[in-house]
Image (cartoon, grey):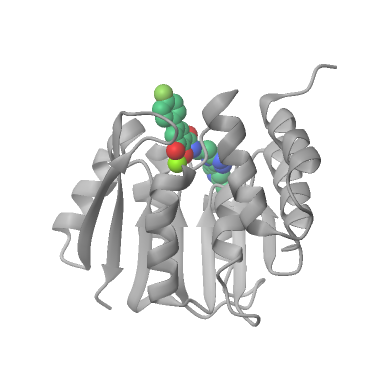
C-alpha cells in the first residue's frame, strides 16, 4: 500500500531530523511542506506567533484540538515547563498514529498526551477522567465548523477560568466565521487578531486570541 502524505512527512522527518531535537523536527517538516508537498500544519510564520503567545501564557494545563501530524504539538510541547500537562485531541486514527511517532522522535512522548476521539466526546471527559480542573491554554486547529460548538462546550464544562487563553488558527482561510463573530460579540472574551499568511503560501490567514473574562 502506498504511503499517505502524512506518512511521507513522517518518513522525511525520521530520515532528516535529529532524534530528540524538537526544533529540528519542526524545521524539517517545514522544509518538506514548503518544497515538496503542502500540508495543513500551522507552519513557521504563524508558528512564531504561537510560540510567543505560549511563552507569554506559560501554561500548566493545556489542550490542542486537532493534532494532525503533531507539528504544533511538537512546537508547543518544546516550550512547556517539565510539570505541564498537555493533551492533544485527534479524531483520525491515521493522523494520531503519525503524530504519536512524530512526538516520540522529537523526545516529547512523556510531555504530550494524544487523546484519540472527537472533541465533543473527549472535552466532557477532561474533568473527571483526565483530572483537569481548568485550562490555561487551548490551541484550536481542528474542523473549522467545530470551533464555535467546542468553545461553547469548553464554557459549559467549566473548563475556562478568568484569563484562559483560546488561540484559534485559520480564522481567515479556511475561516471560522461563526466562531469569530461569537468570541468577538458575546462579551465573554477579550479578542486580538494576528494577521499572517496561510502556511507555506502567500494567501492571507490569521490567528485569533480570545481571553476568557471569567
Ligand atoms: C479531535 C478532532 C480533530 C480533528 C482534526 N484533526 N486534524 C484536523 C485538521 C483540521 N485542519 C484543517 O482542516 C485545516 C485546513 C487548512 C486548509 C485546507 C485547504 C486549503 F485550501 C486551505 C487551508 C489549513 C489549516 O491550517 C487547517 O488546520 N482536524 C477534527 C475533529 N475532531
Ligand atoms: Mg490550521
Quadrant location of the C terminus?
bottom left
- Ligand 2, by image quadrant, is top left
Q: Residue furthest top?
A: 1
Q: Position of residue 21 (x, y in %)?
A: 71, 59
Q: Position of residue 77 (x, y in %)?
A: 60, 64
Q: Up-down: is 116 above or below 133?
A: above
Residue at 74% across / 34% down in the picture? 12
Quadrant location of the N terminus?
top right
- In the figure, residue 163 lies in which quadrant? bottom left
- In the figure, residue 209 lies in which quadrant? bottom left
Classify residue 61 as left or right of residue 106.
left
Q: Is residue 157 visible?
A: no
Classify residue 61 as left or right of residue 138.
right
Residue at 22% across / 52% down in the picture? 182
Q: Is residue 78 visible?
A: yes
Q: Up-down: is 35 above or below 195?
A: above
Q: Position of residue 156 (x, y in %)?
A: 39, 66
Q: Up-down: is 48 above or below 190?
A: above
Q: Position of residue 140 (x, y in %)?
A: 44, 52
Residue at 68% across / 56% down in the picture? 114
Image mark count: 0
Q: Residue furthest right?
A: 1
Amino acid at each position: 500500500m502506498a504511503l499517505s502524505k502524512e506518512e511521507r512527512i513522517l518518513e522525511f522527518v525520521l530520515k532528516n531530523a535529529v532524534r530528540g531535537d524538537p526544533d529540528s523536527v519542526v524545521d524539517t517538516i517545514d522544509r518538506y511542506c514548503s518544497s515538496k508537498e503542502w500540508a495543513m500544519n500551522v507552519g513557521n510564520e504563524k508558528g512564531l506567533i504561537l510560540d510567543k503567545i505560549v511563552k507569554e501564557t506559560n501554561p500548566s494545563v493545556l489542550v490542542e484540538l486537532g493534532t494532525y501530524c503533531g507539528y504544533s504539538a511538537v512546537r508547543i510541547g518544546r516550550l512547556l515547563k517539565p510539570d505541564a500537562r498537555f493533551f492533544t485531541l485527534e479524531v483520525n486514527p491515521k493522523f494520531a498514529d503519525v503524530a504519536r511517532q512524530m512526538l516520540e522522535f522529537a523526545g516529547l512522548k512523556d510531555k504530550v498526551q494524544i487523546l484519540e476521539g472527537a472533541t465533543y466526546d473527549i472535552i466532557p471527559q477532561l474533568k473527571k477522567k483526565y483530572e483537569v480542573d481548568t485550562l490555561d491554554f487551548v490551541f484550536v486547529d481542528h474542523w473549522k465548523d467545530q470551533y464555535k460548538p467546542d468553545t461553547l462546550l469548553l464554557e459549559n464544562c467549566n473548563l475556562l477560568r478568568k484569563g484562559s487563553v483560546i488561540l484559534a488558527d485559520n480564522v481567515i482561510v479556511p475561516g471560522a466565521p461563526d466562531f469569530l463573530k461569537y468570541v468577538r460579540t458575546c462579551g465573554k472574551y477579550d479578542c486580538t487578531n494576528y494577521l499572517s499568511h496561510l502556511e507555506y503560501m502567500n494567501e492571507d490567514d490569521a490567528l485569533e486570541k480570545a481571553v476568557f473574562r471569567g
